[in-house]
Amino acid sequence: MQMDLATSPGSPERPNEDWVSMALPASGRGGSLVVLDGVTPPEGGYGCVHPVPWFTARLGGALLELSASRPDTELAGILSAAIRRTADAHRETCDLSHVRTPQATVVLVRWGGPGDPVEHLVLADSTLLIESPEGEVRAVTDERVGRLPQEIRRSHAAVDALRNAEGGFFTAAADPSVALRAVTGSTPRSRVRSVAALTDGAARWVDLFGQGDWARCLGVLRAEGARGLIGRVRELETRAGEDGSARTAPRRWKLHDDASAVLAELAGDGDRAVSPPRGR
């Protein structure tokens, strides 16, 4: 098994609000990965004394530990327990009912031995890629954010009115019940060559800049590593800022966003060997 991950802040002046990690048990059978994209709060306050990285570190750590220690609990149950544990850590000091209380998007993947399934959970606008042994790539996404009309997505207030609300979209914040809103599923281990997870800052190579489809994106990850993909995104962002296209984009977006990517090769013995990432 081979793994590669990287994360990069959108600006050196701001802390990275993404969180990414992977774990392999001592037995060498199975593993899990967690990718979170923290939601940047408004400057006017958000009812919490803690910064977003405090939240994503605690939620991510809980997800990683619980996904490994509770193999018989479904991933929605793991997310629910992790949200509850994290909320309890600052319930006495912070207003967890605030619409912008610290929150994050989630990608959670867990796999066992050769006979076990590869389970997945996606909440909000991060992306999971699942590659078959034949090289076909399936993107698992939570489409609710993307379905918001452009006029709503241009307004913070309009988006907040639909945040964690019926008819809107859901993130991992302080309510454990949102775990039931996540996109979940499983795939036989024999049908998975690799999995990759991207926060929207890395996924914009496909869905904002249109440099290729998800299969090509996974190919870049395999050939150049997670850092290579993020480097390509940074080049495109810089170019968009210089030529003015960022100012005329049809929807509001940060010029430079936190970006994280992880690739886990799950192919077992007898599958095609995977070369280490090469430089561009």
Image: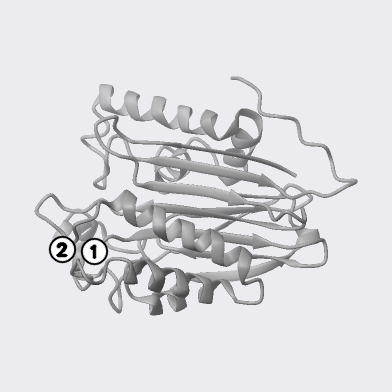
User: Where does residue 18 sit, x and y in percent of width and height?
Assistant: 39, 47
- Image point (30%, 79%), residue name: 166
Q: Residue at x 32, y 52 (%)?
A: 54
Query: Where residue 28 appears, x then y in whole percent?
Result: 77, 53
On the rendered image, what quadrant is the N terminus found in? top right
Residue at image location 74% in from the left, 56% down from the top: 192
Q: Is residue 104 left or right of residue 66?
A: left
Residue type at mark 2 is: Gly
- Badge 2 local density, few (<14 within 10 Å), some, or many (20+)? some
Foreground of the two, 217 or 61: 61
Residue in the foreground of this view, choosing between 151 and 123:
123
Specify whether residue 262 is in view.
yes
Q: Which residue is mark 1?
A: 101
Point out the tag, 1 or 2, that comes first from the N-terminus. Answer: 2
Q: What's under tag 1, amino acid-wise?
A: Thr
Q: In the rendered image, which quarter is residue 172 located in?
A: bottom left
From the image, tell me which residue sits under label 2: 47
Give the Cα separation between the discs numbered 1 and 2: 6 Å
Picture coordinates of residue 12 (x, y %)?
A: 29, 29
Specify the farthest residue to the left.
Answer: 44
Q: Mark 2: which secondary structure?
A: loop
Say if mark 1 contacts mark 2, CB within 8 Å. Answer: yes
Q: Nearer the viewer, residue 216 or 159?
A: 159
Q: Residue at x 31, y 28 (%)?
A: 240
Lateral position of residue 236 relative to residue 222, left or right: left
Left or right relative to 269: residue 266 = left
Res 198 visible: no
Where is 189 relative to 175, above or below? Answer: above
Q: Secondary structure at mark 1?
A: loop
Residue toward you, 265 or 32: 32
Check residue 251 in the rendering and tell me which mark sits there, or answer none.
Answer: none
Mark 1 neighbour class, 10 Å CA radius: few under 14, some 14 to 19, many 20 or more: many
